Protein backbone atom coordinates (compact mmCIF):
# COMPACT_ATOMS: atom_id res chain seq x y z
CA UNK A 1 0.00 0.00 0.00
CA UNK A 2 1.54 3.29 -1.18
CA UNK A 3 0.39 5.70 1.54
CA UNK A 4 2.10 8.85 0.11
CA UNK A 5 0.39 8.30 -3.24
CA UNK A 6 -3.03 8.04 -1.59
CA UNK A 7 -2.37 11.19 0.44
CA UNK A 8 -1.33 13.15 -2.67
CA UNK A 9 -4.40 11.91 -4.56
CA UNK A 10 -6.86 13.05 -1.90
CA UNK A 11 -4.95 16.30 -1.33
CA UNK A 12 -5.37 17.16 -5.02
CA UNK A 13 -9.04 16.22 -4.74
CA UNK A 14 -9.36 18.54 -1.75
CA UNK A 15 -7.78 21.42 -3.66
CA UNK A 16 -10.15 20.87 -6.56
CA UNK A 17 -13.04 21.63 -4.19
CA UNK A 18 -11.51 24.56 -2.34
CA UNK A 19 -9.64 26.64 -4.91
CA UNK A 20 -11.47 29.32 -6.86
CA UNK A 21 -13.10 28.46 -10.16
CA UNK A 22 -12.60 30.60 -13.24
CA UNK A 23 -13.54 31.04 -16.88
CA UNK A 24 -10.58 29.52 -18.72
CA UNK A 25 -6.95 29.91 -17.76
CA UNK A 26 -7.09 33.73 -17.93
CA UNK A 27 -10.45 34.26 -16.25
CA UNK A 28 -11.14 35.89 -12.90
CA UNK A 29 -10.99 33.86 -9.71
CA UNK A 30 -14.57 33.20 -8.65
CA UNK A 31 -15.11 32.65 -4.93
CA UNK A 32 -17.99 32.85 -2.45
CA UNK A 33 -20.47 34.48 -2.47
CA UNK A 34 -20.31 34.20 -6.26
CA UNK A 35 -20.93 30.98 -8.13
CA UNK A 36 -20.03 30.03 -11.69
CA UNK A 37 -22.48 28.40 -14.11
CA UNK A 38 -21.92 27.22 -17.70
CA UNK A 39 -24.64 29.60 -18.92
CA UNK A 40 -26.64 32.53 -17.61
CA UNK A 41 -30.03 32.21 -15.98
CA UNK A 42 -32.53 34.60 -14.46
CA UNK A 43 -30.99 34.46 -10.99
CA UNK A 44 -30.28 38.11 -10.02
CA UNK A 45 -28.07 37.10 -7.11
CA UNK A 46 -24.44 36.00 -7.33
CA UNK A 47 -24.52 33.75 -10.38
CA UNK A 48 -21.80 34.37 -13.00
CA UNK A 49 -21.22 32.57 -16.27
CA UNK A 50 -18.54 32.25 -18.95
CA UNK A 51 -18.56 33.65 -22.47
CA UNK A 52 -15.87 33.14 -25.10
CA UNK A 53 -13.87 30.93 -22.73
CA UNK A 54 -12.06 33.59 -20.67
CA UNK A 55 -14.77 36.26 -20.31
CA UNK A 56 -16.76 36.35 -17.06
CA UNK A 57 -20.30 37.68 -17.38
CA UNK A 58 -23.21 38.56 -15.10
CA UNK A 59 -26.84 38.69 -16.19
CA UNK A 60 -29.32 41.22 -14.85
CA UNK A 61 -33.00 40.48 -15.50
CA UNK A 62 -34.89 43.23 -17.34
CA UNK A 63 -31.59 44.59 -18.64
CA UNK A 64 -29.12 42.05 -19.96
CA UNK A 65 -25.48 41.03 -19.67
CA UNK A 66 -22.47 42.92 -18.40
CA UNK A 67 -18.82 41.91 -18.44
CA UNK A 68 -17.15 41.38 -15.07
CA UNK A 69 -13.90 43.33 -15.25
CA UNK A 70 -12.66 42.58 -11.72
CA UNK A 71 -13.83 41.51 -8.26
CA UNK A 72 -12.37 42.80 -5.01
CA UNK A 73 -13.52 40.47 -2.25
CA UNK A 74 -11.91 42.58 0.49
CA UNK A 75 -13.74 45.77 -0.42
CA UNK A 76 -16.78 44.00 -1.89
CA UNK A 77 -16.44 45.78 -5.22
CA UNK A 78 -17.62 44.37 -8.53
CA UNK A 79 -16.29 46.29 -11.54
CA UNK A 80 -18.34 45.86 -14.70
CA UNK A 81 -18.01 46.79 -18.36
CA UNK A 82 -20.87 47.43 -20.73
CA UNK A 83 -20.21 45.34 -23.87
CA UNK A 84 -22.25 47.89 -25.87
CA UNK A 85 -20.00 50.74 -24.64
CA UNK A 86 -22.91 52.78 -23.34
CA UNK A 87 -22.68 53.29 -19.59
CA UNK A 88 -25.63 55.65 -19.48
CA UNK A 89 -27.89 53.11 -21.11
CA UNK A 90 -26.99 50.86 -18.19
CA UNK A 91 -27.68 53.66 -15.71
CA UNK A 92 -31.01 54.37 -17.38
CA UNK A 93 -32.32 50.80 -17.44
CA UNK A 94 -30.51 48.78 -14.77
CA UNK A 95 -32.76 47.98 -11.81
CA UNK A 96 -30.79 46.87 -8.75
CA UNK A 97 -33.70 46.85 -6.32
CA UNK A 98 -34.29 43.09 -6.67
CA UNK A 99 -30.64 42.17 -6.46
CA UNK A 100 -28.06 42.09 -3.63
CA UNK A 101 -26.11 44.84 -5.43
CA UNK A 102 -26.01 48.61 -5.23
CA UNK A 103 -23.71 51.22 -6.73
CA UNK A 104 -20.31 51.38 -5.07
CA UNK A 105 -20.11 55.15 -5.47
CA UNK A 106 -22.41 57.78 -4.00
CA UNK A 107 -25.48 58.26 -6.18
CA UNK A 108 -27.54 61.34 -6.96
CA UNK A 109 -30.76 61.94 -8.84
CA UNK A 110 -30.42 62.76 -12.52
CA UNK A 111 -33.15 63.20 -15.10
CA UNK A 112 -32.79 61.89 -18.66
CA UNK A 113 -34.24 64.18 -21.30
CA UNK A 114 -35.03 63.39 -24.93
CA UNK A 115 -34.92 66.58 -27.00
CA UNK A 116 -35.88 67.09 -30.63
CA UNK A 117 -33.29 69.84 -31.02
CA UNK A 118 -29.91 70.34 -29.31
CA UNK A 119 -29.86 72.25 -26.03
CA UNK A 120 -27.02 73.51 -23.87
CA UNK A 121 -24.68 70.76 -22.80
CA UNK A 122 -23.35 67.60 -24.30
CA UNK A 123 -25.79 64.96 -25.47
CA UNK A 124 -25.09 61.28 -24.83
CA UNK A 125 -23.77 59.95 -28.17
CA UNK A 126 -24.74 56.29 -27.67
CA UNK A 127 -28.35 57.24 -26.84
CA UNK A 128 -28.76 60.06 -29.35
CA UNK A 129 -29.38 59.99 -33.07
CA UNK A 130 -30.88 61.93 -35.94
CA UNK A 131 -33.77 64.04 -34.63
CA UNK A 132 -33.34 63.13 -30.96
CA UNK A 133 -30.75 64.18 -28.43
CA UNK A 134 -30.53 62.62 -24.96
CA UNK A 135 -29.16 64.54 -21.99
CA UNK A 136 -28.77 64.08 -18.24
CA UNK A 137 -29.71 67.08 -16.10
CA UNK A 138 -30.40 67.74 -12.45
CA UNK A 139 -34.07 67.35 -11.53
CA UNK A 140 -34.25 71.05 -10.60
CA UNK A 141 -33.58 72.08 -14.21
CA UNK A 142 -36.66 73.33 -16.08
CA UNK A 143 -37.51 71.05 -18.99
CA UNK A 144 -37.42 72.96 -22.32
CA UNK A 145 -40.43 72.77 -24.61
CA UNK A 146 -38.44 70.80 -27.16
CA UNK A 147 -37.65 68.05 -24.63
CA UNK A 148 -39.57 65.40 -22.78
CA UNK A 149 -38.56 63.68 -19.58
CA UNK A 150 -37.60 60.01 -19.95
CA UNK A 151 -36.86 59.03 -16.38
CA UNK A 152 -35.26 60.24 -13.16
CA UNK A 153 -32.86 57.74 -11.64
CA UNK A 154 -30.22 57.55 -8.91
CA UNK A 155 -26.83 57.14 -10.60
CA UNK A 156 -23.19 57.94 -9.72
CA UNK A 157 -22.83 60.82 -12.17
CA UNK A 158 -24.39 62.61 -15.11
CA UNK A 159 -22.99 62.44 -18.62
CA UNK A 160 -19.69 64.15 -19.35
CA UNK A 161 -17.62 63.93 -22.50
CA UNK A 162 -14.59 63.54 -20.24
CA UNK A 163 -16.02 60.34 -18.77
CA UNK A 164 -16.50 58.23 -21.88
CA UNK A 165 -14.97 55.02 -20.51
CA UNK A 166 -17.52 52.20 -20.80
CA UNK A 167 -16.58 50.92 -17.35
CA UNK A 168 -16.34 54.15 -15.35
CA UNK A 169 -19.03 54.25 -12.72
CA UNK A 170 -20.11 50.64 -13.21
CA UNK A 171 -18.80 49.65 -9.81
CA UNK A 172 -21.19 47.70 -7.62
CA UNK A 173 -21.02 46.48 -4.06
CA UNK A 174 -23.10 43.76 -2.44
CA UNK A 175 -24.74 42.76 0.80
CA UNK A 176 -23.92 39.36 2.30
CA UNK A 177 -26.72 36.99 3.30
CA UNK A 178 -28.01 37.33 6.86
CA UNK A 179 -27.28 34.59 9.38
CA UNK A 180 -30.13 32.47 10.70
CA UNK A 181 -29.85 34.14 14.12
CA UNK A 182 -30.27 37.64 12.68
CA UNK A 183 -33.65 39.29 12.68
CA UNK A 184 -35.11 40.51 9.45
CA UNK A 185 -38.06 39.98 7.16
CA UNK A 186 -36.17 40.39 3.92
CA UNK A 187 -37.34 37.44 1.86
CA UNK A 188 -34.50 37.92 -0.58
CA UNK A 189 -31.92 37.38 2.16
CA UNK A 190 -33.66 34.23 3.36
CA UNK A 191 -34.03 32.88 -0.14
CA UNK A 192 -30.36 32.90 -0.94
CA UNK A 193 -28.96 31.98 2.49
CA UNK A 194 -29.13 28.22 1.98
CA UNK A 195 -27.33 28.49 -1.36
CA UNK A 196 -24.26 30.12 0.14
CA UNK A 197 -24.28 27.95 3.24
CA UNK A 198 -24.20 24.95 0.91
CA UNK A 199 -21.35 26.51 -1.07
CA UNK A 200 -19.35 27.14 2.09
CA UNK A 201 -19.88 23.53 3.24
CA UNK A 202 -18.12 22.07 0.19
CA UNK A 203 -14.56 22.77 1.47
CA UNK A 204 -15.50 21.43 4.89
CA UNK A 205 -16.92 18.21 3.41
CA UNK A 206 -13.87 17.83 1.19
CA UNK A 207 -11.62 18.31 4.22
CA UNK A 208 -13.49 15.63 6.17
CA UNK A 209 -13.17 13.25 3.22
CA UNK A 210 -9.45 13.99 3.06
CA UNK A 211 -8.97 13.34 6.79
CA UNK A 212 -10.98 10.11 6.60
CA UNK A 213 -8.94 8.94 3.62
CA UNK A 214 -5.63 9.71 5.34
CA UNK A 215 -6.82 7.95 8.51
CA UNK A 216 -7.86 4.89 6.53
CA UNK A 217 -4.55 4.84 4.69
CA UNK A 218 -2.61 5.08 7.96
CA UNK A 219 -4.72 2.30 9.49
CA UNK A 220 -4.09 0.04 6.50
CA UNK A 221 -0.40 0.85 6.68
CA UNK A 222 -0.31 -0.14 10.37
CA UNK A 223 -2.18 -3.38 9.70
CA UNK A 224 0.14 -4.15 6.80
CA UNK A 225 3.19 -3.50 9.00
CA UNK A 226 1.78 -5.73 11.76
CA UNK A 227 1.12 -8.47 9.24
CA UNK A 228 4.72 -8.34 8.03
CA UNK A 229 5.95 -8.33 11.64
CA UNK A 230 3.84 -11.38 12.51
CA UNK A 231 4.99 -13.15 9.37
CA UNK A 232 8.64 -12.47 10.22
CA UNK A 233 8.07 -13.66 13.79
CA UNK A 234 6.51 -16.90 12.51
CA UNK A 235 9.49 -17.45 10.21
CA UNK A 236 11.90 -16.90 13.09
CA UNK A 237 9.95 -19.36 15.29
CA UNK A 238 9.92 -21.97 12.54
CA UNK A 239 13.65 -21.48 12.00
CA UNK A 240 14.29 -21.94 15.74
CA UNK A 241 12.21 -25.11 15.82
CA UNK A 242 14.06 -26.53 12.81
CA UNK A 243 17.38 -25.67 14.38
CA UNK A 244 16.44 -27.38 17.66
CA UNK A 245 15.24 -30.44 15.76
CA UNK A 246 18.52 -30.66 13.91
CA UNK A 247 20.50 -30.36 17.16
CA UNK A 248 18.33 -33.07 18.70
CA UNK A 249 19.00 -35.44 15.81
CA UNK A 250 22.81 -35.02 15.82
CA UNK A 251 23.46 -37.38 18.80
CA UNK A 252 21.21 -40.03 17.24
CA UNK A 253 23.31 -39.96 14.06
CA UNK A 254 26.53 -40.49 16.05
CA UNK A 255 25.17 -43.56 17.89
Image (cartoon, grey):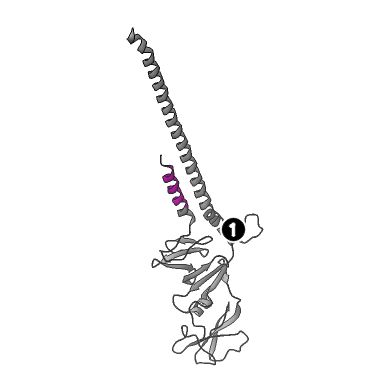
Residue 95 visible in this rendered orientation of the protein: no
Residue 225 visible in rendering: yes
Where residue 198 appears, x then y in whole percent? 53, 53
Query: Please, what secondary structure does the residue beneath circle 1 have?
Result: helix
Q: Quick one: which residue is furthest to the right in this view?
A: 183
Residue 109, by quadrant, is: bottom right
Number of dots carrying numbers: 1
Report if residue 85 lies within the magenta region.
no
Which corner quadrant of the image does residue 177 belong to?
bottom right
Residues rendered magenta in the picture:
1-14
Pick the residue in front: 206 or 178. Answer: 206
* Front residue of this view, candidates 68 and 189: 68
Secondary structure, magenta segment, majority class: helix
Residue at point 61%, 79% (across, down): 108
Rendered view: 243 above or below 255: below
Q: Is residue 35 left or right of residue 154?
A: left
Characterize the local packing of mark 1: few (<14), some (14-19) or many (20 or more) Cα atoms within 10 angstroms.
Answer: some
Residue pointed to by mark 1: 190
Is residue 102 placed above or below 240 in the rendered structure?
A: below
Q: Nearer the viewer, residue 87 or 218?
A: 218
Amino acid sequence: MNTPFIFIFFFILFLSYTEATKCGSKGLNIKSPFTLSPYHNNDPNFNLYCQNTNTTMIHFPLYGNLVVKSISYNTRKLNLIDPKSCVHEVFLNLNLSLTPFRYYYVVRNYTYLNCSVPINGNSIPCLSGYGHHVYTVKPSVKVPDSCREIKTVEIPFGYSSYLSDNSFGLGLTWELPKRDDEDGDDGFEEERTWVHLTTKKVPMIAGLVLLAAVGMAMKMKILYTKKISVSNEDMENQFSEDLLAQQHNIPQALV
